[in-house]
Amino acid sequence: MQAKPSLVDAHSKQLLKDWEAFVQARNQEELPQNSNRLAFADPQFLTRRETRGIRIQLELLKPDLIQQEMGIDHTVVIFGSARFCDRQTALEQLEKAKALGSAKDIQKATAIVKNSVYYNQARELGHLITQECKTMPEKDRLFVCTGGGPGIMEAANRGAHDAGGLSVGLNIALPFEQEPNPYITKELSFRFHYFALRKMHFMMRAKALVAFPGGFGTLDELFETLTLIQCKKSSPVPIILFGKSYWNKVFHPEILVEEGAVSEEDLHYFNYVDDVQSAWKIIKDFYLNGVPRPI
């Protein structure tokens, strides 16, 4: 005897049917206002200024619930430039720049070749974290989480993918389109409108932050994490600055101490490393051989 569909299933099907009606109507040149349309399928209503709180709540709930369902409780967040690529791609870009003969383009492409080492190291780190955590109890496993874009983010997701593990991507809708990289686990590729909600999701599950060389976005996430920990809004986690030579050029925290802007103790929140094994060791040592403590 065939089982009778549950009320929940029937209700969900009706909601999906109503949503499909909205999608079909949306394909018209103009979607007319309709007070009888279901509120969740009414774009004029959902995109009003007054319903911003609803949209914010949805961006909070959707990634949280899906990650809970897939057992993603602890993450290592890996940041870095979206512009750094693997060495082969970087060399191809350099050859194109040389062919065009622009000194400015050649200089830029040469820097990308130099920094391609970080792509390879981020990929290696993503692989190492994923491989090492496979033997942990499910409740203690760490998963790679990135901003979901290209460059260093792609490399870290790629390493996790190479190791046969899950990884998360928290992408952001930008005026210039940024597609999620292809190595994020399909079910864990999220897209945000609000930067604030995206940042919140990074910190909700983060048990470590690894900042590879990057630009404004990387610095933003680094300083936000440091601020949350300094102000006791977040529990301390390992913060690792990967690439000593880069960070020594762009980040001078000792000057903040000299000027009295931060305490000397605040410099203990982060560590500099130049290799993947050292980064992983810092994370393991912090959590007593890799077992995350609850926040």
Image (cartoon, helix red, strand yellow):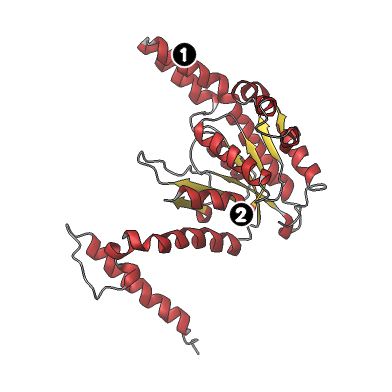
Q: 159 or 26, which lies in front?
A: 26
Mark 1 neighbour density, 10 Å: few (under 14) some (14–19) many (20 or more): few
Q: Position of residue 48 (x, y in %)?
A: 31, 60
Direction from residue 209 to residue 268 in the image, left or right:
right
| Mark with earlier residue (2, 1) | 1
Q: 22 or 203, which lies in front?
A: 203
Q: Is residue 210 above or below residue 201?
A: above
Mark 2 neighbour density, 10 Å: few (under 14) some (14–19) many (20 or more): some
List the residue tagged with mark 1: 107
Helix, strand or loop for disc 2: helix
Q: 5 or 257, which lies in front?
A: 257
Distance from disc 2 to disc 1, alpha carbons, whole Å, reads 40 Å
Q: Is residue 17 above or below residue 216?
A: below
Quarter holding residue 127: top right
Residue appearing at x 64%, y 40% in the figure: 226
Direction from residue 92 to residue 236 in the image, left or right:
right
Q: Position of residue 171 (x, y in %)?
A: 47, 46
Q: Is residue 86 above or below residue 290?
A: above
List the residue tagged with mark 2: 204
Q: Position of residue 20 (x, y in %)?
A: 31, 68
The disc labelled 2 sits on which kind of residue?
A: Met
Q: Residue furthest bottom?
A: 1
Residue appearing at x 41%, y 64% in the figure: 54
Q: Position of residue 243 (x, y in %)?
A: 65, 26
Residue appearing at x 17%, y 59% in the figure: 30
Residue appearing at x 61%, y 50% in the figure: 203
